Amino acid sequence: MNSTTIQPAASVKGEMVVPGDKSISHRSIMLGAIANGVTTVRGFLRGEDNLSTMHAFRAMGVEINDDGETIQITGRGLHGLNEPGDVLDCGNSGTTIRLITGLLSGQSFFSVVTGDQYLRKRPMKRIVEPLSRMGAQISGRNGATLAPLAINGAPLKGINYQSPVSSAQIKSSLMLAGLYADGETSVSEPSLSRDHSERMFRLFGASLARNDNGVTVRGGVELTAQEVTVPGDISSAAFFIVAALITPHSELLIKNVGVNPSRTGVIDILQGMGGDIQLLDLREVSGEPVADILVRSSRLNGISVSGGVVPRAIDEFPVICVAAARAEGVTTIRDARELRVKETDRITAMAGNLRKLGITVTETEDGMDITGSEQLLGGIVDSSGDHRIAMSMAIAALVASAAITVTDIACIATSFPTFFPLLEKVALK
Ligand code: S3P
């Protein structure tokens, strides 16, 4: 099995840029494909997850060119997609399968979506159930709760849906279906999840209204191609933010990072732990806030994390756990049940890995308690096939007392193919 061994570092220093935001990259292909005109995308993330989205739309007749710098998508309008000739393979990407299923529900053709062994275990009822209420005809394994899903495109009608979980994938799936529905489709959630869809729908000219934790989309409105510039992914930057915070003598500038407030929970949590993190040169690009992030090594304290900040930091909990392992005192994480249905069960995976490094961790149903320590042991840990677990454990290795070997690391390519070269550049021996 593929693995790598990471040595402790003396400091994390320098300037770096992280690759483009994964969520925004997915959405740029999807909206570009169904808009009128040619959309250009700069800063697109060429990770495996986003390539799954690209392949799916090419399979539906969309011309997408990549000259290595810019992606050009020749939009086919709301009703211009073709029936795909084969099953659409979404790989490991939850965003691809859930968003695309919403979009496919309103087409006039048949399609099947599936993914890898991990994606085929992830819950799909959360989208199938509300989409079915809109009139979608979806069947699949285990009573249409698991992929593969087969979608018979059908006429849709708008609904008013109160989602029991704060999930941008559920919200965005219904918003995409809503573009094809008769009337208005409204989605509200307990607290706001990432709002990239709302921002990009507006950019492309969709008819959309927002209130606190809700959004309404009117169906039948054609979209117009745009020039999109994707900022660096804060979820990728988070690994390096924690690296600089926990490694002594560190100072790191991460340039051009998306700092959409629905994504900056990780910064709030780490600052709450005492982390020295500054956002510099705040600006707006393609409707998204962007900044440079300056981080210096800091003494961290344990913290209680729960409530509305959780969806704003949902992908960063594995690396927040690493920060907690180095903090003084106990960090409690609650209201984070969603972590159990990510690429793997991230609560159990992180608890198990941190225990192997000598950290005391107690799991709860919706979170965990982590008792920080000055000493992190070396050893062998496994990613469970989850990119963010793999990268988090590589960051832990920078401050361990001996090398850490992380096994099953190929998954890192789903979101951050250049992670190790960048780590080598800034983590000094
Ligand atoms: C994403 C939404 C989140 C996140 C995922 C990307 C998106 O999932 O974990 O990595 O792009 O919409 P949920 O909506 O299931 O929380």
Image (cartoon, rainbow, N blue to C red):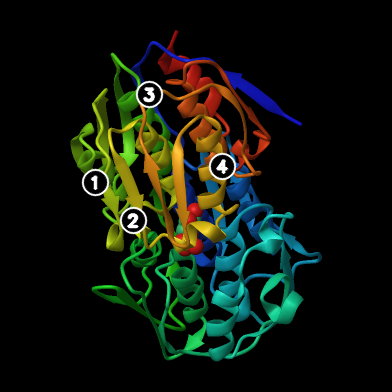
Callout 1 secondary element: helix
Q: Earlier in the sequence, mark 1 or mark 3?
A: 3
**Residue under numbered circle 2:** 312
Q: CA distance from mark 2 to mark 3?
A: 24 Å
Amino acid on which the number 4 mark rests in the picture: Gly
Which circle marks residue 352 in the picture? 4
Amino acid on which the number 3 mark rests in the picture: Met
Callout 2 secondary element: helix
Whether residues under marks 3 and 4 lie with C-beta atoms below 8 angstroms apart, the answer is no
Callout 3 secondary element: strand
- Nearer the observer: mark 1 or 3; the answer is 1
Residue 116 vertical position relative to residue 126 in the rendered view, above or below: above
Q: Position of residue 94 (x, y in %)?
A: 58, 59
**Residue under numbered circle 1:** 268
Q: Earlier in the sequence, mark 4 or mark 2?
A: 2
- Nearer the observer: mark 4 or 1; the answer is 4
